[in-house]
């Protein structure tokens, strides 16, 4: 991928770590013990860093707004995740989380684009040609609305068959983050 310093936006749950739906106490990663890195993620993030890509997390975390865990708890999980990623040769430039419930109708909850806008202002990055990699229809919609190319990975909530039926389809579908990154980087 060229030029260097391309921005790759990633959803978190279902892309970096096992989606918590159906097996954690609240269907959220409310505790670090429930954070399970998916196979190939460390290698994918290491490849992105080695190729000059900036990785930015964009994730809805309504469990905070619902009272299942605190914003400080979310920050602690994010810090531990980032520390593990760095220890394996990768990096996360920044993380942006919407902590509101769907009922709050805020501008930062995907599929709205507030988190992307905040990232753009804060990081002063050119997002032209940027990708958003997620695991849900909401991720694809958010990426499209933000003017990004979209990749759906099948390690989270959505299946290939479901995605084929969506009105707004992802630009690409891959089995997992590593497969998507290898394609992006032409490996």
Image (cartoon, helix red, strand yellow):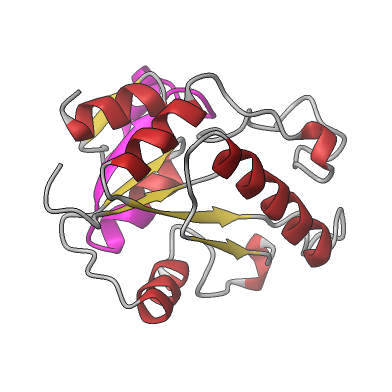
Task: Answer whether residue 18 is magenta in the image.
Answer: no
Quadrant into which the C terminus falls: top left
Q: 73 or 49, which is in the foreground?
A: 49
Q: Residue at x 26, y 38 (%)?
A: 170
**Picture coordinates of residue 30, whole percent (x, y):** 82, 46
Instruction: Using the image, determine if residue 103 lies above or below residue 180.
Output: below
**Picture coordinates of residue 104, whole percent (x, y):** 66, 72
Q: Residue at x 47, y 68 (%)?
A: 115
Instruction: Using the image, determine if residue 153 lies above or below residue 65.
Output: above
**Picture coordinates of residue 131, whole percent (x, y):** 27, 49
Within the image, what quadrant is residue 171 found in?
top left
Within the image, what quadrant is residue 111 found in?
bottom left
Residue range in magenta is 142-168
Classify residue 99 as left or right of residue 143.
right
Q: 53 or 122, which is in the foreground?
A: 53
Quadrant into which the N terminus falls: top left
Q: Residue at x 82, y 58 (%)?
A: 73
The answer to whether residue 130 is seen in the rendering is: yes
Q: Residue at x 44, y 27 (%)?
A: 43
Classify residue 23 as left or right of residue 54.
right
Q: 90 or 172, which is in the foreground?
A: 90
**Picture coordinates of residue 23, whole percent (x, y):** 79, 25
């Amino acid at each position: 991928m060229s030029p260097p310093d391309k921005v790759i936006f990633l959803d978190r749950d279902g892309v970096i770590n096992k989606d918590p739906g159906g097996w954690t106490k609240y269907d959220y990663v409310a505790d670090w013990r429930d954070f399970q890195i998916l196979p190939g993620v460390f290698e994918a993030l290491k490849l992105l860093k080695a190729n000059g890509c900036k990785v930015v997390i964009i994730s809805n975390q309504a469990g905070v707004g619902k009272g299942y865990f605190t914003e400080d708890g979310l920050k602690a999980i994010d810090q531990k995740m980032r520390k593990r990623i760095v220890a394996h040769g990768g990096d996360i430039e920044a993380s942006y989380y919407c902590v509101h419930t769907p009922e709050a109708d805020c501008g930062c909850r995907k599929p709205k684009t507030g988190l992307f806008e905040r990232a753009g202002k804060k990081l002063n990055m050119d997002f032209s040609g940027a990708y958003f990699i997620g695991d849900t229809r909401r991720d694809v919609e958010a990426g499209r609305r933000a003017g990004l190319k979209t990749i759906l990975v099948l390690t989270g909530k959505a299946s290939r068959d479901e995605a084929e039926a969506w009105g707004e389809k992802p630009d690409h579908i891959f089995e997992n983050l590593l497969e998507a990154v290898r394609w992006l980087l032409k490996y």
